[in-house]
Image (cartoon, grey):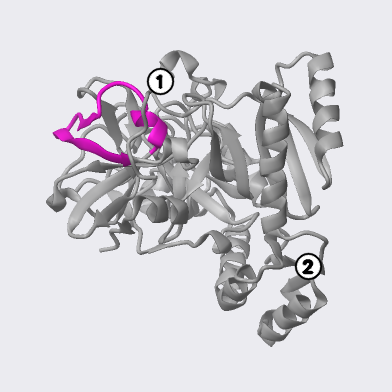
Amino acid sequence: MTARAAPRATKNDEGDTPASLRRGALVVAIVLAVTALATEPATAVRNQDDRARVWNDVDALARGREALGFPAQGVDDLLADSDALEQLAETGFLLTASEAQQLADRRQLAVDLAGVIERAAASDGFGGLRLEHIGSGTIHFYVTSTADREAIKAGVPSAVASRARVHVVERSLKELAEAIDHLWGVARMARLDAGIVSIGIGVAENGLILELADDLDRGAFERLELALANASAVQLRVVPAARVVEANCASREDCDYPMRGGIAVRQGSSAGPACTMGFHVRSGSDEQFLTSGHCGYSGSNTWYHAGYGSVGSELASIYVGGYDAMTVQMTDSQASNKVYWNTSSTKPILFSYSNGLLYNGMPICMSGAMSGNLCGTISASYTTWTGASCSCTQVGAKATFLPSGGDSGAPVYNGTWAAGLVSTTQGHFVRIADALSYLSVTLVNS
């Protein structure tokens, strides 16, 4: 399963770059004194990060706020607020003081319920988890039996009992995942799969969400919708979506001693097609880094960083195994637990999430070689999509941020916890637990 994929297909090039790249990229690099922020806030946001390339994507900031349940409007005013800019530097979200407290309360709620969440996720009848972004937050559990419901209720600490809801539903996550596999099979037999962007689990509705390419003509869209609705034994919601583009091919181009996740790595030479260095991992005493499996699906298997030179060669890939991840050799002394945040600071990654601890609505950020730092929430903790290079089904999760070409492999994380690796420009990412398990590596956390 960890063997290198062969034969290889043709890699996407920069001609596939989506509209999100043209809109610019959100760069969250505010490590300045408060006085400097107060005197030149707009300049501080636009000129701090990455020396050669700096963007301030107001649309991305608005999307991040909207994903947290806060008003998307008013971003321009917040960019002139030193307190909001401090929150941007710390959390990745542009927030007022009261909003920052609400976000902290929601994150603390997940911490307070971590044990309950782990036990619930281990149950065969677990149907998923969702964070409702209102005020200080409410976590919703979905289970298939009253016994599971009562067990969860009994385990919730009384201090947060009013902010935990438990719902009994018909189908477990396992059953919904099996329904996804069935629909992909039906679509391929009918040669309809080319129009499918992804099939994911809608936790709140205990059903599936079918995303169809928005460039399908109306007739094809309706035929595909009808065919799959008839083949599905579960509730199916159909939505239009842009076609998936793999987010491969800054300056995150000059970094060493040690290196860190979020910097650019290039295939074949220091000027080759770019992907992003992900989290650093170990196989025994050997240290490596993760990135997207599709980045190495064609062309050279040697990777470079412009500020360092040759980093190492690809070791193992599971792209055709359903998980878009691979490992690349690196010098042990260059490995670290750091993720690039801006030119003067990093985020340490100490832990990794299990699949069961990822939930819909979880605040999440990424650090990409092209887009910089983007933040949003998890919109699907389990989803599938077709890999553009191999035309094979990939498994992972999805976030509300929109990466750009060059961000493939970018670390996805929440605080000091690793969550995954960016895979597509639609926000799909490989879950970190899957990458670590299937590649037989562990996270470098010191």
| Residue 251 painted magenta | no
Mark 1 is on which residue type? Lys
Left or right: residue 44 versus residue 338 is right
- Quadrant where the C terminus sits is bottom left
Mark 1 / mark 2, whichever is N-terminal: 1
Quadrant of residue 112 in the image? bottom right
Q: Is residue 419 visible?
A: no
Q: Residue at x 83, y 61 (%)?
A: 170
Q: Residue at x 56, y 63 (%)?
A: 357
Q: Which residues are magenta?
A: 292-316
Left or right: residue 48 versus residue 247 is left
- Position of residue 311 relative to residue 116, above or below, is above
- Quadrant where the N terminus sits is top left
Disc 1: which residue: 11
Disc 2: which residue: 144
Q: Residues within 10 Å of mark 1 (few under 14, many from 20)?
A: some
| Residue 314 painted magenta | yes
Image label count = 2
Quadrant of residue 443 in the image? bottom left
Left or right: residue 193 versus residue 353 is right
Quadrant of residue 277 in the image? top left
Q: Considering depth in this image, is 190 or 99 the residue closer to the camera? A: 190
Q: Residue at x 13, y 52 (%)?
A: 333
Left or right: residue 286 versus residue 207 is left
Q: Residues within 10 Å of mark 2 (few under 14, many from 20)?
A: some
Mark 2 is on which residue type? Thr
Asked whether disc 1 touches disc 2, contact meaning CB atoms under 8 Å apart, the reply is no
Residue 223, percent from left and from top:
83, 21
The residue tagged with tag 1: helix, strand or loop? loop
